[in-house]
Image (cartoon, grey):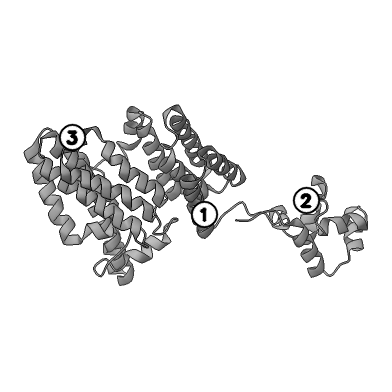
Amino acid sequence: MQSIHFADNIARLRKEKKITQEQLADFVGVTKASVSKWETGQSLPDVVLLPQLAAYFDVTIDEMLGYEPWLSKEQIQKIYLELAKEFATEEFEKVMNKSRELVKKYYSCYEFLSQIVCLWINHYMLPGGTRSMEILEDAEAVCDHILTNSKDIGLCSDVVSLKATIGLRMGKATEVIETLEEMCNPYRLETQNVGILIGAYLQAGELEKANSFTQISMYDYLVSLVGCATQYISIHKDNLALCEETFGRIHKVADAYELEKLNFNVMVLFYYQMAIIFCQHEKKTEAIALLKKFIYLTDAFLQGEEGPLKGDSYFDALDEWFNKLTLGQNAPRDKKIIYDSMISVFATPAFAVLEAEDEYQKLKEFARKRGSNL
């Protein structure tokens, strides 16, 4: 992360131009002592002199000050992970205020701002109550700022999705529908664009791009399939037969593509929702079996060194893609917060019917003990 380095820069620029402090002082109309103080960091020039100095050295004012309003992907990732760690270990408002100051500092670095929105979405629930809603409102305001000022079409498209996510969590279902309904229209020809692009890569002989894009698309569709199935069984929670059929079909797909290894998170959410439905229909054994999968898969991630996203021998182009993402293969929340979320699962009202089951109690105890290893 960059900061003001005017003293070092003004001395370097002067030496590169091969002039003395006195010559620079004469040019801008100040004393040699003033220039000396600039270079030793004792003072800064009057703001009205900055354009004249920048023009003299043929640099921008930002370059002369050593201030970089744009952050690299690596810098954004570093800041995000540091803040995520601090949200897990420090007082919430202290970290929140730190993130707000960074928003002000890099108010024109829209990629960074979008990641701050992601950070807030992933941690807004920590304080609870009206404070959580206030954080979502702040995140929504940052989204509006990006959408109003950024000229990056791809980034703005992502931010529209982030704003819709915020709206859904704030209970603004009608607004979300108005925003996304046409964008997600299944009758639009743009749904065919992926296949057309892959065909173009093949026609142009760009086999590596065709292979990479095809793998990414297949992976995305698989993750989307499981995500939609999770919502589908929630919609049809009273129809046990349909939910069990859906579970069986998704289980076959997940086994075939080893989705528990590729993206454990989408699978544990599916298992969690199906466990709730089993409880609602008094199928306790089946519910506990899925809760075990939920806990063991989450625990394996928490105890491991790898991120939540990874490729394998079949999807051998995914790791390169993941590494190009702003957060790379890192989880959007610190492991301690993920662990707390795992423990909170046992407070789900639907699981109250399992309290008398020994296997359920053993699972709760196992989960509690695993936190000591983090």
Q: CA distance from mark 2 to mark 1?
A: 29 Å
Q: Closer to the camera, 181 or 269? A: 269
Badge 3 element: helix
- Answer with mark 2 or mark 1, whichever residue precedes in sequence: 2
Task: Please tell me which residue is depicted at 41% across the width and 62% down the height of the picture.
Answer: 323
The circle on residue 76 is 1
Neighbor class of circle 2 (other Cα within 10 Å; few <14, some 14-19, many 20+) is few
Which residue is under mark 3?
A: 235
Q: Amino acid at mark 3?
A: Ile
Q: Would you say 134 lies left or right of 34 here? A: left
Q: Compared to 332, does 241 lie above or below?
A: above
Depth check: give the residue in front, 242 or 296: 296
Return the x and y of residue 225 as percentages of the image width and height. 21, 49
User: Are there few (<14), some (14-19), or many (20+) residues within 10 Å of tag 1?
Assistant: many
Q: CA distance from mark 1 to mark 3?
A: 38 Å
Residue type indicated by callout 2: Pro
Where disc 2 sits, the SS reads helix
Of labels 2 and 3, earlier in sequence is: 2
Find residue 277 and report its horizontal and vertical position in percent. 15, 37
Q: State the image quarter where residue 287 is shown.
A: top left
What residue would you read off at disc 2? Answer: 51
Residue 292: x %, y % from top left: 20, 50
Question: Which residue appears at 34% of the width and 31% of the height?
Answer: 178
Q: Nearer the viewer, mark 2 or mark 3?
A: 3
Residue 105 appears in the picture as rendered: yes
- Relative to 92, residue 7 above or below: below
- First in residue order: circle 1 vs circle 3: 1
Using the rendered view, name the quadrant where residue 350 is placed. Answer: top left
Q: CA distance from mark 2 to mark 3?
A: 62 Å
Locate the N terminus by quadrant. bottom right
